[in-house]
Image: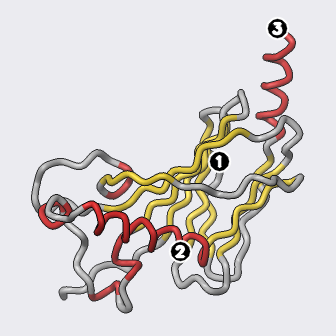
Amino acid sequence: MLAHPIPDLPVHAEFKFNGEVHIKVEIDPRCFEVDPEQEPYLVYGVYKALEKKDLAEMEKEANALIAKSIKFSFEPTLTVKPVFTYRYTTLGDKPLDKNDQTPVVLQADWKFKIPNKTRTYQVTALPAGKYSVLFINHIVGKKQDLNVLFPKEASYKLDLSLVSRIRKSHLKK
């Protein structure tokens, strides 16, 4: 009766016509625990009492969790490596309200630019990970199909040709 749902790792990617990419990974801090299903959510009342060193430690754990759980792939291969910045929201990337019982999660943000020749994007749920990974994408504002991945599974290859076509036509103007 007191159990909470097992967390997963939603990965949202937004591809804009100018080549800008924003990848977000939502991380429930319960993922850092041995038995997250039995752990309560981090709530705003507790979050607001945390010190900067506590938040820095959580962000360090989040970086390790992402590295252990998710592989980001592009064709052709990009040399850029994920570098995440962190912010705190409630579930679904909604702003925190000041209610002490509001669940708090980390949003890991990675923003970069892809070369015009980038053809595909794919995510793999790595074998060392223990959470399902949700592959959620938007290309130039249009939502793409959702893919749920369990450890050792790879998503479909998201075709980025629409981004390239729009970029080329926009550059010609």
Residue 5 vs 172, above or below: the answer is: below
Q: Which residue is mark 3?
A: 173
- What's the residue type where badge 1 is placed? Gln
- What's the residue type where badge 3 is placed? Lys
Q: Which residue is mark 1?
A: 144
Residue 150 vs 55, above or below: the answer is: below
Q: Is residue 2 left or right of residue 5?
A: left
Residue 92: where, in percent of width, then height?
A: 38, 54
Front residue of 114/56: it is 56
Q: Earlier in the sequence, mark 2 or mark 1?
A: 2
Which quadrant of the rendered structure holds the C terminus?
top right
Which quadrant of the rendered structure holds the N terminus?
bottom left
Q: Which residue is mark 2?
A: 64
Q: Residue at x 84, y 35 (%)?
A: 116
Q: Residue at x 53, y 85 (%)?
A: 130
Q: Residue furthest front?
A: 53
Label 1 crowding class (10 Å Cα cut-off): few <14, some 14-19, many 20+?
A: few
